[in-house]
Amino acid sequence: MYFDVIIAGFGGQGVLLLGNLLTYGAMEEDRHVTYMPVYGVEMRGGTANCTVVISDQEIGSPVIHHPLNAVIMNKPSLLRFGPMVQPGGRLFVNASLIDARPGDYPETKMIRVPTIELAAKAGDQRLATMTMLGALIEETKVLTQESVVKAFKKALDKRYHKMIPINTAALEEGARFIREGKV
């Protein structure tokens, strides 16, 4: 098994947290994993992206030039990373903030996820990235949702552990969106 993803958006959207959760989730499943964050000096509001590689084999490098998957949370990130996705790869697009159509990147499978609306349905629209993570996991089957829920305790500071139930609800909303085929 081999899985790679570039996750991109602006600082404050939870892009790096999403990468951390994938990483800790992979460790929960005893997989090999690499995580490489990149962010602008301004952080909140600036650009942020990370790469995650998960495999059953040792991983030679965390660098991904042409990912199999990309999670895109804002339009500038789509313009930068969308064209890099391999033909036949998956492009997860935050449909709440980005007006993009599958024909824009015809060689990829575009999965448009209304992250903010799904997060509001779960109880807090600020959890948009968690709904995207739920959609990513459900679509790719790279990890189990249970592994990611366990990863919350490692990725979140203890003072935020009380937020795990609502984060789990947002994760489930994203997964449900994929299961119900509303893409």
Image (cartoon, rainbow, N blue to C red):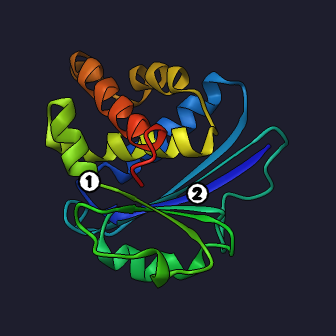
- Residue, disc 2: 5
Q: Position of residue 154 (x, y in %)?
A: 44, 24
Lateral position of residue 117 relative to residue 183, left or right: left
11 over 105 or under it: above or below: above
Query: 84 and 35: which one is in front?
Result: 84
Query: 79 and 174: which one is in front?
Result: 174
Q: Position of residue 86 (x, y in %)?
A: 67, 73
How far apart are the two marked residues, 1 and 2, measured between alpha carbons?
17 Å
Lateral position of residue 90 relative to residue 156, left or right: right
Rate crowding at label 1 as few (under 14), some (14 to 19) or many (20 or more) other CA atoms within 10 Å.
many
Work out which residue is located at the far right of the displayed protein and give it.
57
Which residue is found at the position 28% from the left and 50% from the top?
A: 115
Rate crowding at label 2 as few (under 14), some (14 to 19) or many (20 or more) other CA atoms within 10 Å.
many
Q: Which amino acid, mark 2?
A: Val
- Residue 127 showing in the rendered view: no
- Report helix, strand or loop for mark 2: strand
The quadrant of the rendering that contains the C terminus is: bottom left
The quadrant of the rendering that contains the N terminus is: top right
Which residue is found at the position 46% from the left and 83% from the top?
A: 104
- Residue, disc 1: 13
